[in-house]
Structure formats: structure tokens, C-alpha cells
Amino acid sequence: MEHTQDKVVRRELILDGLHCANCAMKIENNVQKIQGVSACSVNFVSKTLMLETANGYEKAVVDEATRTVNRIEPQVTVRLKQPAAISDMAQQTTSDSETEQKPGLSRRQIMITRLVVGAGLTAAGLWVPLPGWAEFTIFLVAYLIAGADIVWQAVRNILRGQVFDEYFLMSVATIGAFAVQQYPEGVAVMLFYQVGEMFQGMAVDRSRRSITALMDIRPDYANIQTEDGTIQVSPEAVQIGDHMIIKPGEKVPLDGIVIEGSSMLDTSALTGESVPREVAPGKEVLGGCINKNGLLTVKVTRMFSESSVAKILELVENASSKKAPTEKFITRFARYYTPEVVIIAAMLAVVPPLLISGATFSDWIYRALIFLVISCPCALVVSIPLGFFGGIGAASKAGILIKGSNYLEALNDVRYVVFDKTGTLTHGTFAVTAIYPANGYSENQLLELAAYAELHSNHPIAESIRTAYQGKINTNRVGHYDEIAGHGIQAELDGQQILAGNARLMEREHIHYIEPQAPGTVIHLACEGQYAGSIVIADTIKTDAAAAIQQLKQQGIRRTIMLTGDSWTVGEAVGRQLGIDEVHAELLPQHKVEEIEKLEQQRGKREKTIFVGDGINDTPVLARADIGVAMGGLGSDAAIEAADIVIMTDEPSKLATAVRIARRTRRIVWQNIVFALGVKAVFLILGTFGIATMWEAVFSDVGVTLLAVLNATRVLRAETPATGGTLPESQPA
């Protein structure tokens, strides 16, 4: 996969066999230093390495990156990600026993066998009376069976200049335990470390599967109609104009238009909405939806690479390349933390015996070794990326696409939310919202006059009137038809003169009229010179718009603001109905940018501003705000490209859901940080004073890592937003 921007090329590499988050961090740091690499990010969750380089140098850079990865982690297999392999993320998240299924025992089965044999030999050494040399021999054999690969990896890393990592910590701690004749504890540390790594790998794989299952929308095949019948091909092989046959229960492979059949589509994977969507000939369908009941024939309108499902998958897969400040902090923390811990451990082993009377080197070396075991930073390095990626996955499940964990974390600091009106808080489509008949006319008669008067007009207001009129229109009833510029329409209906237009038309014809108080565009009607009444047409407010404003205020948003190009009358009416704090009307796009800039001068230094728009005509404001949120809707390419966050359902209340998920993610991430550092601090102190042994040390390290990973998976449970405060569908703007 690649995109070119100012002659920059992106390449993605699949890192098969990457099971260590700290290793992922080392790979990222080293690949970043390769000459010609302008940007680099390793996604531990999806096992991908993304790098950017200048056009023409990509092959050399990819080759050098591959050599770097193999040097750091020899067991990792590197391959270039092809466009057709967009589902690799899901495929890679199967368990090790599936991905590495070869003749004979799998990697995990071999590890379990080693651990069982090592534990058996250790038990024999503890319980069977043996002479000194025999005891040492049996523990040494057990140690080599359990952890020879860890020691060998530590030696390889030291030779390459990569000294301070978890392999080094465990090797020094366990070999040191043998040096002070604590053989059982030396073997036990290695056994428990390997058990912990295995369970950690299983927990991470489970988290990966849970996260990617949320976005399991990629179709596996497409049934294409040909002269010789129906053939099954990959989605990438389908061309624009091909006819797809979609059977009940199948995923829609690509975007297209229904040309035959009708059915209900499950769009929940794309929008988070559980209510099925009905489609019939002429309706658009999107790839990734599931056909519920009918047989559909669909004409393809977009290639797979340009389809909605491909763009959504790309957004979710690449989201972790934009890392949150907390992730960057932990990466920097781990880089300096381990060397400092080793230095402190060395001082702990040497200084007290020299300064404290009666202190022995063997005792303080043992305490220093405990210090090393506890200090492994795995819990932080593994759980924090999982937490942020889980938050992005939970938001995706709710129909909210967040383009990076930096934006997910930034949502926590939002205090000002700025809305566009049309298409964001309102539907952006006109509808009849009020009918005021006069002089004996009924509502249906008034609608009939208006529908025939607007028969030949293509204006959205005319279309809304014809839609509201339920009767069948007979064009033969309309005679002379004349459109009066700036005023309205004059027509003959069954030989009677009909007038339909604004107040100026009534004044011109000297017809007394009544001006309604309802906000919106008013159409006055008269028949044979007598006033018949008025119809109000307005853009309708979205049903959840009031709830969205209410929920945001409950979440601590200080001020909600609406910017609109509509009139002051309409803008203030919408603002009052929704409870918006501040309204600015009759604005051009450049004026909206100016309002955002004014707001930035008034707010606090750490506070952030969101602008929510439709992603098409609001592009300048979306780019200017700290976080741009687009009402993407189904298939809105412009919105997906323009914004930092895309709400696929067009529901403003999903913004409150996004803030809720962001706060939940940050809370869980910081729980892991405080928990891991707190437990380690306690055991470091206990180990320093000789209270904790190596057994407790390894239990605390492995236990903290597993609990932190399991806690990170809680992010996946997206909360359901509160309901209430909605407006009726027909509420006018």
C-alpha cells in the first residue's frame, strides 16, 4: 500500500512472529535511524511496520529495514504488505498454533514441553537428596532446558550493542542466582518468566482477535455475473460496471447500485447501527454490509481499493501510526528506565557491603538480582498500546472512525465544541414543517394548490412540497404556467389562477396575507385573488441533536457554539431549541475560520476545540480546529479524507460517545501505569530490604503484566450513550 505526497512513498511490512512489545519498540527506534526514512511506526497489535521514504529509494530502504528487523529479532519473518492483503491484520491475529502450524509440534507445544521437563527436574532437585555436584548439575540442566534461548538472545543482543532489555535482565538475575548458590530460585525465575511470556502472548493474541473482530468487514469473495454464469473472484479482481450477485447472509463485496431485487442490509459493522437498512433497485449499497434476506444484483460503482470498506479498514489499521502523548512518554520512559535500573542494581550489590559493617556481598548481590527481576517494564510496554488500539476499535464498533490514538487522547482535553448547522445538527434537507390554511381551505387543499403550482420547479423547496402532498398529480389539470423571478409562481389549475410565492408576491397582487411565526421559508398561496393560507418549509433538526448537546454539557464541555451561513432568524431558532450557548449566523467559510481563531485566543492553554461539520464545504474549518469531526454518513469520501474523526452515522450524539470512550481509554491506561509502577515500587523496596525473595519478584512481574493486559481489554466494551432529550423528526430548524 502506498500513497504519494510531495514525492513521499509509504510502505508497510508484515512482521510475522512479533510477540514482544519491547521488541517492537526497539525495531521502531532502529528503523527510524535508517538513512532515507522520514517516518516510521511499528504497530504491535497488527504486527506491521509502516515507513515513509522518498520516491525512488523505497526498495533500498525496505531491504535495509528488513535486515535491521532480522538483526534485532531473528525469529521475526518480514514480508512486504501487498494491496490485496488488506485482511492480513485479521489473519495475523489467529493463535500461534494456527499461524505456525507445521509438521510436528508447534512453537507453543515445544515451550510447554520444555517448561514441564524443567519444572520436573527442579522438583527432583528440591526433594531428592543429592550430593552437591549432582544437585548443581540437575538444576543447571533444568535451567538450560527452560531458558537457554533467553540467555542466547541476551548474548546476541550484547554483541550487537543492545544491552539493556528484558533478556539481559532475566539472564543476569538468574545467572547471578546460580553464582550465589541459589539454584532453585535461579531456575524458578526463568521458568516463571517463560510461563509469563507464554500467557502474555496468549492474552495479547486474544486482545488482537477481539480488536480486529470489531472490524471484520472485509469481504472474502464476490460472485460476478458473466455470460457463462456466475463465477467467484476476489474483491480486488472486480471491475467497475460488473454485476455482482449477493445471496442472503453474504457480505456485500464492493460499493454499487442495486439493479435487481430488494432486501434488508445489516450496516452495523460500518455504522454501529443495529436497525437494518432497506434497499431496492436504484439504491446505493456499501461494501462490508451483510445481506439479510433477499437476492440482490448490484452494479459495481467503485474498485475495491476505492470502496468504503477498504478506506475504513485502512483508517483503522493505520490509526496506531499516530501515537498518543502517553504512548510516546512510555516509549521514552522504557528507553531510559532499564539502564538506570541496572546501574542502581549494580550499586546496590557493591556499595552496602563496602559501607555497612557485617554486610556480605552474597546477600546484597541477591537483593540486587531481585531488583533486576522486578524492574522489567513489560507490563507498561505491552498494555498501553493495547489500551489505545482497543479504544479505537470500540469507537469503530460504534460507527466512529478515529484516525489516531493522538486524537483519541486529545478528546479528553476538549472543552469547546463548535457545530456547523446544516447537515450536522439538521438533516440538510427541506421538509414541510407547518401548514396554515385560511378562508375555509383545509390543509390538504392548501397542499394540493402548492403541489400543482410547484409542478415544474426543480427547487428543493418545490420538491419538499410535492413530497408532502400524498395525492397523485395530474399534469393535464395545469394550464398556463409562469415563474415570476424573485416572487414565486403564477399558474392555472382547472382554469383558476393560482399564486404561490413569498410575501412580495402577495403585496404585488394586493392580496392581504398573514405572516406565520414559525421559523423557515414561507410560501403564501392565493386562488382567484383570495388568500388561501401559507406553508412553512424548513430544514429539520436531527432527532438526537438535543441529546448530543445535553450529554456534552454533562461531560464538562464549557461552551457549545453553532456557526451557520443561514439567516439569524433560523440560526437563533435552532440554537434556542437545542440549548446551544452561542450562535453566529450568516457566515461564509472564511468567517467560520475566524471564529475558531477567536475562540483559541480565549481558551486555556491545555484546552482543545472540536469543530463538527459535514466534511465538504467545511474543510478549512475542519483543518483549523484542534480536532475536526466530520459527519461522514454512508460513503462520504470527502468527509473521510478531511477530518480527524468521522462519524459514520451522521448522528451528533456519537460525539458524546467518542468523548466517553476516550475518557474510559485514558482511565484504563493510567490505571495500568499507576498499578504497574506502584506494585514494582513496593517490591523494589521490599527486595532492597531483603523482605521479598526472587519467588515474589517473578510473581509480581508476571502477575502485573498479565493483569495489565487483561485490564486493557476492558476498553473494548464501548458504553451505550444515554438517551433522552431528543426532538421529533418533524421539528423545524
Image (spheres, rainbow, N blue to C red):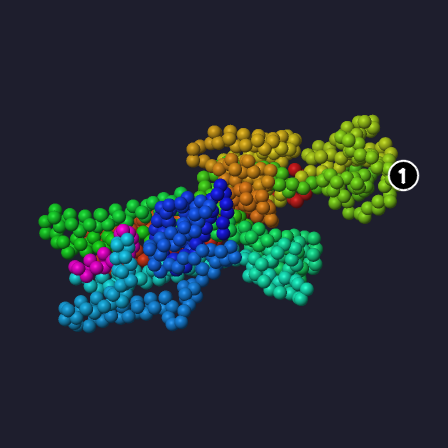
Q: Nearer the viewer, residue 17 or 10?
A: 10
Chain part drawn in magenta:
161-180
Does residue 297 sit above or below 636 in this rendering? Answer: below
Q: Nearer the viewer, residue 365 or 446?
A: 365
Q: How many marks?
A: 1
Residue drawn at x 55%, y 45% as measured from the top left: 640
Q: Is residue 409 left or right of residue 444?
A: left
Residue 107 visible somewhere in the drawing: yes
Residue 95: % across, % down: 42, 63
Q: Residues within 10 Å of mark 1 (few under 14, many from 20)?
A: few
* Residue sitting at the far front: 56
What is the quadrant of residue 632 in the picture?
top right
Q: Is residue 323 left or right of residue 293?
A: left
On the image, numbered disc 1 is attached to which residue? Answer: 495
Residue 38: % across, % down: 41, 44
Residue drawn at x 45%, y 55% as measured from the top left: 80
Residue drawn at x 77%, y 47% as measured from the top left: 470
Queried whether the magenta region covers residue 336, the answer comes back as: no
Q: Is residue 125 left or right of residue 712?
A: left
| Kind of residue at disc 1 | Gly
What is the quadrant of residue 176 in the picture?
bottom left
Q: Nearer the viewer, residue 176 or 683?
A: 176
Q: Nearer the viewer, residue 238 or 558?
A: 238
| Quarter the C terminus occupies | top right
* Residue sitting at the far right: 495
Residue 425: % across, % down: 60, 40
Queried whether the magenta region covers residue 176, the answer comes back as: yes
